[in-house]
Structures are given as C-alpha cells and as structure tokens.
Amino acid sequence: MDLQRCSINSTTVRGLGLSELIEAVSGRGIPGVGLWRDCYAGLRISTAANQVRSSGLRVTSICRGGMFTHRDDEDKSRSADENRRIIDEAHAFDAECVVIVCGAPVGKDLDVARAQIRDGLDALAPYAQSAGIRLAIEPMHPMMVADRSAITSLAEANDLIQALDHENIGIALDAYHVFWDVNYPSEVQRASGRIYAVQVCDWVVPIQGQLTSRGMPGEGTIDLTAFVKHVARAGYDGLIEIEVLSDAWWAVDPETALDAAIRGFEAMSEA
Amino acid sequence: MDLQRCSINSTTVRGLGLSELIEAVSGRGIPGVGLWRDCYAGLRISTAANQVRSSGLRVTSICRGGMFTHRDDEDKSRSADENRRIIDEAHAFDAECVVIVCGAPVGKDLDVARAQIRDGLDALAPYAQSAGIRLAIEPMHPMMVADRSAITSLAEANDLIQALDHENIGIALDAYHVFWDVNYPSEVQRASGRIYAVQVCDWVVPIQGQLTSRGMPGEGTIDLTAFVKHVARAGYDGLIEIEVLSDAWWAVDPETALDAAIRGFEAMSEA
C-alpha cells in the first residue's frame, strides 16, 4: 500500500521522543502520526502541538480516552475529568479522533459495564462535539474483556454507536481486534461513514499476554490485504495507522522497527 | 451447585492415570468424567472402557475430534481417518459426545477454513450417527483462531449446526470460550436441545498463552452463576464438566487440584 496512506502510531516506536518521532516519520515521507499520550507526557501541550503542526503531519488519533467503567461516583467523576482533558489535548493537536478504550467490568457483571460505557459516552459526546473532536470506539479483542474493554466485537460497537446516535461517535477499527469474526466484513460495511480511525498490525502465535504480543503487518496470520479491501469498500479513504504493541519489537532499535513496519505496510495490496 | 451435576474432565487432573482418575472421582461422589484421549492412550480401548463402565461413571465427553482444516487431500484423509477412530473410541466408552475442535486455517484464509470445517462435519456426521455418537462443536475463544478453531463464537457454531442439519451435531458449550460475547445468553437459548456438553473453568488475567492459562471456577472473572442459569433456562439438565487447562494447577498435586475444582463447582449457585 502506498505510504501516502500511512500513519505511524507512536507506540510502534515508543523509544522515540516526540521530536524524534516527527523527524523519523517525516523523513520517510509518511504523512501522519497517531499519538499515545506518553509520547508528549513531559511537554506542554501547546508546545507539542506546535511541533507537530509545523511538521505538517496529520494527527490521525490520540490514544486513549474511555475507561468508563467505575466502582463508584468518585471513580466515575475522575474518569469524566480525564476524558475532557484528553479531548482538550486532541483539540490542541487538531487530531482526527480520540480512540476510546471503553473499560473492563469492575466485577463480573458485563451488563453493568456495558451500561456504564453507554452512559459515559452519552455524557461525553457533547463536550467532544463542542471541541470538534470525534470519539472512535475501539472494539477490542475478546481476550481483553477482563482488563481493557467490555465491547468485544465490531457488531457490538456498531450497535452502541447506533443506540447513542451522536454523529461524532464512531469506530476505531483495528484489524487485530476484529479479524477473527466471521461477520467482521459485513460489520465494516455497516460502519461505513462512521469509521474514524483504522489501524493494522498482525496476529502472531503464540500469544504471550493480552496486550503486547503483536507483530508488524505481514508477520502473522491476518489477511491484511482483505482487511484493507473491506475498509476501502466501506468508503474509508483516510490514513491507516500502523500500531504495534510488541515486547519483541520494543526491544529493537526504533528506527529499525519503523523500517520493518513500513515494509509490512507496503506489502499490503490495495483493493 | 450439587455435585450430582458434576463431571471431572481428565485434563483438569492430568497427572492421574485412568484408574486413579476413576477412583478419585468416584470416591468423591461425582457421577461423571470427561476423557481426553491421553488419559487412556497406553491402554487397550476395550480394557479402558470396561474400567470406566464397571465404575458406573458416565462419560460426558471424549476430547477431541475435528481438526478438519487441511493443506491437501492427504491431510484431509488423515483427519477423516482419525475422526472415525475417535468415534469408535467414544462408542466403546458409551460416551455422551465427542467434542469437536474444528481446526485453524492452514494459511490466512478463514473462509477456506470455515468451508473445510463445514464439509468435514457433513462428511463425518453419518458415521457418527451410525455409531450413535453425538458430535459437539466447541466454539472457541477468538484468541485461538490461529491455532485451534476458526469457529470463534456461539452464534457462528449455531449457524453451522443449523446449516448442516444433522441431528447428531450440536454444541459443546464452555463458559471460557463464550462469556465475553454480549450475545451469548441469547445464543445459549438458541442452542436449546442441541447442547451436548457443558464445561466450566474461569478466566484469570493476565492470560499467559492461549491454551493453558485457565482457572478453577471462582478464581477469575466469569460470572459462572449467570452461565449455569442460562444453561438451565435452555433446558440442559446433563452433567457439567470442570475442564481446566492450567499450567499453574498442573504443577499442583492432582488430588489437591481436584478438591479445589470441586469447591469451585459447589460455589456456583443454581438457578
């Protein structure tokens, strides 16, 4: 796939500071970055935002908001404050969306968690709307249900955005989280017009932990060529982030990792 | 839950040989066992079957058949032979079903894998029928899609048995594989009358590998009381197997593990 469609998520090369990230990405002719908050954590937001803006890079996402599940009102209010802060940051960066990781159940009751998530999104949407920021719900792989998100399929996320009916709430679609699902292609079509971020990485066995066992595109078993075809058919023409959480790749020099990511991206065929 | 509803899957206490398993289970007043083939691998089938039969224990399942995905015709034929052998064994044990683990894609194409699975089941069903053996498709957790089964949700398994329409093909329902799914309760109802095996264990984070990171009932985050309620509402009144694949528990004396399993089972409330 053409690198003009590529965005590099900062966590893929998390050894780089923000200015190094900007330099490495711009220097390779890539037009965008996705930013995890840790990559600008030590900087004043306006300074960091100016750095990115003057580079001309698009900011395809800020990761992450959400975590709506809570034990009590204090928890709930802390999470709401944090989410408004993230939206302010996304606004400063002129980011295309905030990725929403919805949160895992506090106890065993997934229904309660799902209700808290729906209510939390409903309450947050107007604030995001007034800041001109889209919220992109990331349905997450079911192996993360107990520690990241009770929203475990694209169908469930589509149902959620349909029920909420705020135009600034849509989907962050990561191949890693949805490829296993026999219905994901039709659900990608259903999400058409509401896909606010697209991410790729690969599924490498054996899985070692829920979070950081991912591979660069092409290293694993996901048919990413089919994935980007489904995404194109749904009308998505934005950038596609390479987001790879990987203990193995984090142990490698980030510039080397970045080159591997780019080779994998280029090897994905376009529709 | 009453131990009269309990069956112990041999892999939960895999340090025990078949006769030790029979003694340990019978001695605790439990009416059934599920058998992985490794627990009788060194024995003549008729001898092993006689041992179980004379104990009076029910055999709730034989694990496992399936693995229908294949690279070529030789692969396919080897898998078919093996599946007939397993059915013969299940017949010898007078087992209530053979658990079917459908198989992972050989390459990246899940559609091909799913077609091979459907065809393999369709071809096997008559042989199983003539032996009086039920085939219980186990939808598996999506984290196993690349190494165990392309059938990753209960909805997909229900669609599959509906499409195949052989009365001896049904579901092996393991809480671990389905609990994450917002639709699993309604899909359990949909499977009513076709649930041929039910298994419990628990989801313990962090996950360490796809296969052997499970906990005893009550150790993790699955609402097993809700699970057995859904199962009861669907009309299932058979035994419920405790099947725990766990590196941690396998490192413990099997009799101790068995007692822990039983305590967890008893702590699940009935509907």
Image (tube, coloured by chain):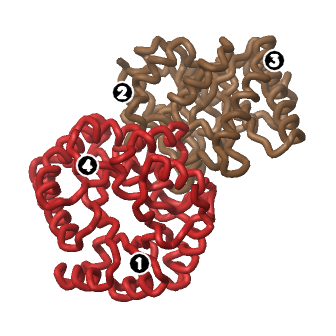
Chain colours: A brown, B red
Q: Could you tell me how far apart the alpha carbons at marks 4 and 2 are, in whole angstroms?
A: 31 Å
Q: Chain of mark 4?
A: B
Of tags 1 and 4, the one toward the viewer is: 4
In the rendering, at what x and y percent does residue A115 appear?
70, 33
Residue tagged 2: A226
B73 lies above or below A151:
below
Q: Could you tell me how far apart the alpha carbons at marks 3 and 4 are, in whole angstroms?
A: 52 Å
Q: Camera-side residue: B69 or B178? A: B178
Residue tagged 3: A127
Is residue A20 something one can see in this rendering?
Answer: no
B167 lies above or below B128:
above
Q: Could you tell me how far apart the alpha carbons at marks 3 and 1 are, in whole angstroms?
A: 56 Å
Is residue B59 something one can see in this rendering?
Answer: yes
In the rendering, at what x and y percent does residue B184 appear?
49, 42
**Left or right: where A59 falls relative to B94:** right
Please report contact status of discs 1 and 4: CB closer than 8 Å, yes or no: no
Q: Earlier in the sequence, mark 1 or mark 4?
A: 1
Q: Could you tell me how far apart the alpha carbons at marks 2 and 1 are, in whole angstroms?
A: 41 Å
Kind of residue at disc 2: Ala
Kind of residue at disc 1: Arg
Quadrant where the C terminus of chain B lies? bottom right
